Image (spheres, rainbow, N blue to C red):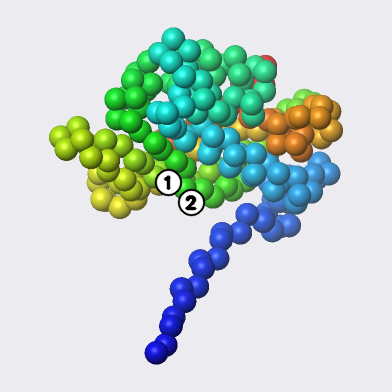
Amino acid sequence: MTTATAQPTPPSDWVLSAQTLQQIGWTGTGLSTGDALEAERTAWTFTDREMSLDYRNAGTQAQHSGTFTAAVFLLTPNARARFFQNDVRVINNVLFDRVEQQHLIQQVVNAQPRLVQFQVQGQQEFAWVEVSFQLWQSQLNPQTGQRVEGLELDPATHGPCVHHMIVLLLRVTPGTQGAIAPMGGTGWLVSTYALDQAGGSLPTVIQPA
């Protein structure tokens, strides 16, 4: 009797080539490949925390919390203010009520970050990272009362839906944010973000960042 073991699928490589980093102006400012990886890791983490939801840890209608605000720790102070003024997770109860009614558990899966642009404005450095990902969802079927689980499907193709989050990061000097800094204080915070932009357009810098 012969037993076959499935080989693991190799993960996609986050490491950008030196040529690519040079082309976007990364290395000309003294930033390293390690800094690029930390930027991608920050954007990956933000997307995971922003897009994953769980009805069992969402706060209340009057005060959303838990998975609804899990990404806030990665925002700049000004971005945090914009989050509480604009993000669908907190500005009203539309998303909150849907998550509660469906008993939705939603998790980001197969996320892949890619540094796509870098820019210096005055004394500030900005990096745009695109994170492609899918959503695994578990929710109640209202007709049967049974739980339905699986990847979110694209209604047009009937295949798994692939989303794209563009995360705009602000460079913060490593080691300046204290002992419990977000991401260990490795140098990046989220200034703004955009989901599934038409044509893949990048969000513009918002000041104050």
In the image, residue 59 above or below residue 52: above
Image quadrant assignment for residue 18: bottom right
Q: Which mark is residue 110?
A: 2
Which residue, as the protein is rendered here, is positioned at the far front? Answer: 1
Asked whether the beta carbons under mark 1 and mark 2 sit within 8 Å of each other, the answer is yes
In the image, residue 130 above or below residue 207: below
Which residue carries the number 1 mark?
134
Please state if 50 lies on the left or on the right of 158 as rendered: right
Image quadrant assignment for residue 206: top right
Residue situated in front as seen by the camera: 207 or 94: 94
Q: Secondary structure at mark 1?
A: strand
Residue 102 position within the rendered picture, expressed as x and y whole percent measured from the top left: 29, 30
Residue 92 position within the rendered picture, expressed as x and y whole percent measured from the top left: 40, 13
Bin the neighbour count of mark 1 within 10 Å (Cα to Cα): few under 14, some 14-19, many 20 and up: many
Task: Determine the residue positioned at 59% across, 14% down.
Answer: 81
Residue situated in front as seen by the camera: 196 or 73: 73
Q: Residue flagged by tag 1: what amino acid is it? A: Gln
Q: Residue flagged by tag 2: what amino acid is it? A: Asn
Please state if 29 lies on the left or on the right of 129 as rendered: right
The Cα atoms of the two marked residues, 1 and 2, are separated by: 6 Å
Q: Of the residues under marks 1 and 2, which one precedes in the sequence?
A: 2
